[in-house]
Image (tube, grey):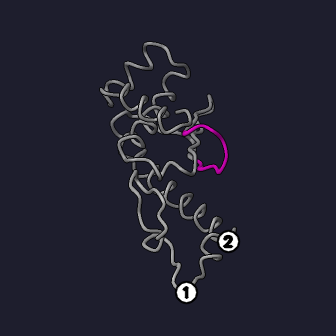
Amino acid sequence: MYTIKYLGEPVLLRKLIDIDGLSEAEILGPEMLEKIKKFYTKSSKKITKERSDYYQATLKTKPKSIEIVKVGGRWGSCTSEKHITYNFMIASLPIELIDYIVVHELCHLYHMNHDRSFWRKVGSIIPDYKKKQDALHKIGGEE
């Protein structure tokens, strides 16, 4: 049985991607890897949009764009031009960590650095953000 992480939990691959009738070689092959990447990209786009829409209303701010990328060691980034980028693997994380990353990046629309004002803004939405940071550091990658 093959599983992948989705929203922080191992989920049978066959519940997320059609693998009926495929051989083990096909399931473990490069075409399936591409299907999994497409699944994560599509899921990450949907989840980050939903969570961004929710928190944008609370924070009263909106990025110019949100993009999902397939490379990089970061979970998210925000440019001074208000463009937010998320790692395509963000859908593999538990929703509370996704929420932290989304809030973190949206708060950069107010503060482009990690000064005290930035962390106060993050903490006003995610009071236990330090626990979320610790959990992300254990998983790997940067917010």
Extreme residue in the right direction: 30
Residue where numbered disc 2 is placed: 31
Viewer-closest of 134 and 56? 134
Q: Amino acid at mark 2?
A: Glu
Considering depth in this image, is 3 or 141 the residue closer to the camera?
3
Residue 46: percent from left, percent from top: 47, 57
Boundaries of the magenta span: 67-75
Q: Which of the 4 image quadrants contains residue 74?
A: top right
Q: Give yes or no for residue 74 being in the magenta stretch.
A: yes
Looking at the rendered structure, the kind of residue marked 1 is Gly
Mark nearer the viewer, 1 or 2: 1
What is the x, y in percent for residue 21?
55, 87
As displayed, is residue 38 above or below residue 109?
Answer: below
Earlier in the chain: of badge 1 and badge 2, it is: 1
**55 left or right of 22?**
left
**Residue 120, placed above or below residue 22:** above
Name the residue tied to disc 1: 21
The residue under the point 57% across, 39% down is: 84
